[in-house]
Image (tube, rainbow, N blue to C red):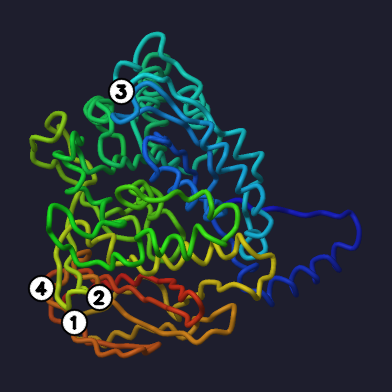
Amino acid sequence: MRYSLIWTGKYPIMLSLFCWLLFSQNPIMAQVIEKTRILVLTDIENEPDDAQSMVRLLTYANHFDIEGLIATTSTWMRKDVADWRIHEIVDAYANVRDNLEVHEKGYPSASELKNRIKRGRSIFGMQGVGEGNDAEGSEWLINVLEKEDQRPIWITAWGGTNVLAQALWKMERVKSSSELARLISKMRVYTISDQDDSGPWIRENFPDLFYIVSPGFEENWGGQYHYATWSGISGDKFHGRFDGPDFTIVNNPWLDDNIRQNHGLLGAEHPHTDYLMEGDTPSFLGLIQNGLNDLENPNYGGWGGRYELYIPPYKKYMYQPETRPIWTNTQDEVYSEITKRKHTSNHATIWRWRQAYQHDFAARIDWSNTSAFGEANHPPVAKLSHPNELTVSSGDMVSLDAGGSSDPDGDELKYHWIYYREVGTLNPLPEMKEDNLQKVSFKAPEVQKAKTAHFILEVTDNGTPTLTRYQRVIVNILPKK
């Protein structure tokens, strides 16, 4: 965790008292965010969605230490990289960064971000990997890995991954096996499908690398993308199949009204959608610190989707068979208010949270457009009166209590408890009666061996737009002695 220490050289006691009073009175300012290291590989300008995702990422820049923004090629843009477009969006961010800082602390300067914009080689896939293919982007990635920083580095690939492949290729040749293993252990990769042939090569040749992906490529819209988990970010209908989510909060009219038009310079950089809104956003959406996301456990589920670790069967749209377990597609069963029935799909692991993540984005764009704290909504603070993990025995009464929750704007709060059945090992659902209650309880069922159950607390305010924060409670249920 990083902290900032301010020292004036005079009146340290008075300064400490002032800071205590200041931070204790403003819950937003009092929050200390442990930043996640992130590096982005993007084929920006291949189509509008990368620029869209870049805009959203920058509204959450205070949640991250953004270590690199690297322009790459992909199957759709094989001979060019567009780092200039990243610079344009960061320039817009420069004009609104101080506004964002009023509403939540920790936003990096634009100059810091611009120093971390780099280029990969203007070559497609594995053609750009090997002797003589070092690039500004791949060298920068190696430097980031070599920093004296023990935190993991999340490499989010919105386009091709040959920058990552080149860095791994070089490190394998210049570093000892133990040092290479140490650096690989720091890496977490989330790839938006395979947008070149380097991804399968990486997974095969570096089997210990943490890797999230819906494997496969797309050609002439006949391939894998409509099967991929990430398409749940904004997908509605694919090949005539209706998946259940609300499309009205991800389409161009909603984005025009809430993000692009009359919402400041950064929102104006969010381009018109051609296919799907922000297909790359799930790569970092699950890293946002909202109380739900769990970075090291993709199987727990969050805004970026839910994934399980296994070797997926080979499909014709994959480059090659997978040779080792990867974090990849799994399913949730989710009730849709649109269709009034349950839907089961890997897309649902993302779209089940759609209203929350869209409203959150809209609120942050509002922040970018005002320097007055009172002119925008801010997320509630979801707080439990007990630990996030409980251990009980069969037959015990279990109480879940969110009585410590609050809202920085004084808004009314609504409470919702979700039993996340797919994540734990307990089945069937415990009988738990709740209707907007801070506190709920249930009787731990009889079990013959230890079981786990995940409960998600949702706390939503009544501001405009409504905003939601979470707490996850893991209940371990042991057989009765």
The residue that disc 3 covers is 125
| Dot in front, 1 or 2 | 2
Residue 14 at x, y percent in the picture: 86, 68
Residue 344 sits in quarter: bottom left
Residue closer to the observer: 135 or 87: 87
The residue that disc 1 covers is 430
In space, the residues marked 4 and 2 are separated at their CA atoms by: 21 Å
Res 448 label: 4
Please, what secondary structure does the residue beneath circle 1 have?
Answer: loop
User: Image quadrant for the C terminus?
Assistant: bottom left
In space, the residues marked 4 and 3 are separated at their CA atoms by: 51 Å
In space, the residues marked 4 and 1 are separated at their CA atoms by: 16 Å
Res 139 label: none
Point out the tag, 1 or 2, that comes first from the N-terminus: 2
| Dot in front, 3 or 1 | 3
Point out the tag, 4 or 3, that comes first from the N-terminus: 3
Point out the tag, 3 or 1, that comes first from the N-terminus: 3
Residue 173 at x, y percent in the picture: 38, 14
Please, what secondary structure does the residue beneath circle 2 have?
Answer: strand
Please, what secondary structure does the residue beneath circle 4 have?
Answer: loop
| Dot in front, 4 or 1 | 1
Would you say the residues marked 1 and 2 are in contact, meaning their CB atoms lie under 8 Å apart? yes
The residue that disc 2 covers is 419
Point out the tag, 4 or 2, that comes first from the N-terminus: 2
> 10 Å neighbourhood of mark 1: few (<14), some, or many (≥20)?
some
